[in-house]
Amino acid sequence: MSREWDVIVVGHTFLDYVFAGIPEWPGAGEEVFARDLRKEIGGAAITACGLGRLGHRVALLSAIGAEDSAWILRQLATSGVDTSLVRLSPQPTALTVSLSTTSDRALFSHWGAAVELAPLLQEAHTRRLLARADVLHFGMGVTLEPHQALLQEMRAAGCLVSVDAGWNKTWLQDKRTIEILRQTDFYLPNQKEAQLMSGASETDAMLHWFEQAGLRCVPIKLGSQGSVMLREGRIYEQPPVPVTVIDTTGAGDCFNAGFIHGVLSGAPPQEWLRVGNLCGAYSTRALGGMAGFPTPEEVRDAK
């Protein structure tokens, strides 16, 4: 059947304040000044914006603060994201302060309105809407309670399901997490997350651990080393895209957008990684997750 959306991204929307050009990490009671500051949309909303810019019919299911809503909704709409599923809350929008260097970043976050997303997913109306997308991407941790029944419903409806929970130590180390991930089509961790979950240090060992655990497809983001993926018993490797890195904030979420774009395009699995790497790498050309995101022409021409 014809579905209303190509993708619904389910997850937390953050206001990202990216401090870059930090000369050194301050000690207790010390102060340093960043050379640059940028306000950007963050969290799972980055993946939604990336997919919108690549031409997909994409909606975001999230909760944001009413006070910040005008700016956030404008950013989403500019990227072609359907905002009809975004719920406004009296709480402030979730907030992240990113202290960024050219190689990595440290994050300080507050949940704010994001805590309202979990109960929203239990509403029957919401679940009916989710079944009207080809792909559901969860940019959040999904758990046995209360998400198991939801995932079963979505897969029964013929939806592909992908998950990137980000750095959530409790979730990554919970033995029940693997059981819920077996019900998904794609799990998209970065190297550090995959290492913590699997207990392995080498990427091949991580991939085989996920295979033995019963996961269908696991692309692992390796940052400056590119990406690898295990799918149907085969390992795929994709080299990094050379760029001059300004800021890595949101690069993983941008990889997710490129990867899902590759899946939806009907391209072979190697192309999923290539486009994912491209979107992740190009996003690092500027501060924040979306300022450096590639255009559809850049994705098409960068072979």
Image (cartoon, rainbow, N blue to C red):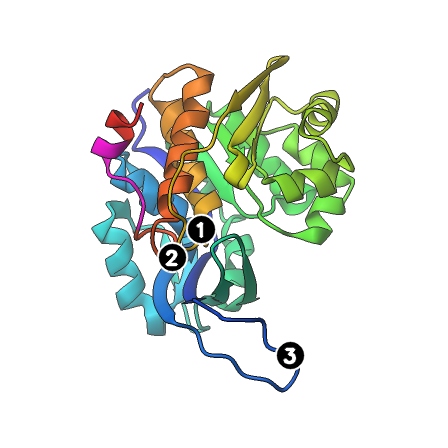
Q: Is residue 132 above or below residue 49?
A: above
| Quadrant (top left, top right, bottom left, bottom right) of the N terminus | top left
What segment is highlighted magenta in the picture? 292-298
The residue beneath circle 2 is 288
Of tags 1 and 3, which is closer to the observer? 3
The residue beneath circle 1 is 250
Horizontal relation, residue 95 to residue 49: left or right = right
In the rendered image, residue 240 lying in the magenta stretch gets the answer: no
Residue 72 x/y as whole percent? 31, 62
Horizontal relation, residue 60 to residue 124: left or right = left
Query: Identity of the amino acid at label 3?
Result: Gly
Query: Identity of the amino acid at label 2?
Result: Gly
Quarter where residue 16 is shown: bottom left
| Nearer-N-terminus badge (1/3) | 3
| Nearer-N-terminus badge (1/2) | 1
Residue 23 x/y as whole percent? 50, 71
Q: Is residue 287 above or below residue 293?
A: below
Residue shown at 28% from the left, 59% from the top: 73
Query: Identity of the amino acid at label 1?
Result: Gly
Residue 211 x/y as whole percent? 69, 21
Contact (Cβ within 8 Å) of mark 2 with mark 3? no
Alpha carbons under labels 1 and 3: distance apart: 26 Å
The residue beneath circle 3 is 27
| Quadrant (top left, top right, bottom left, bottom right) of the C terminus | top left
Q: Is residue 245 above or below residue 1?
A: below
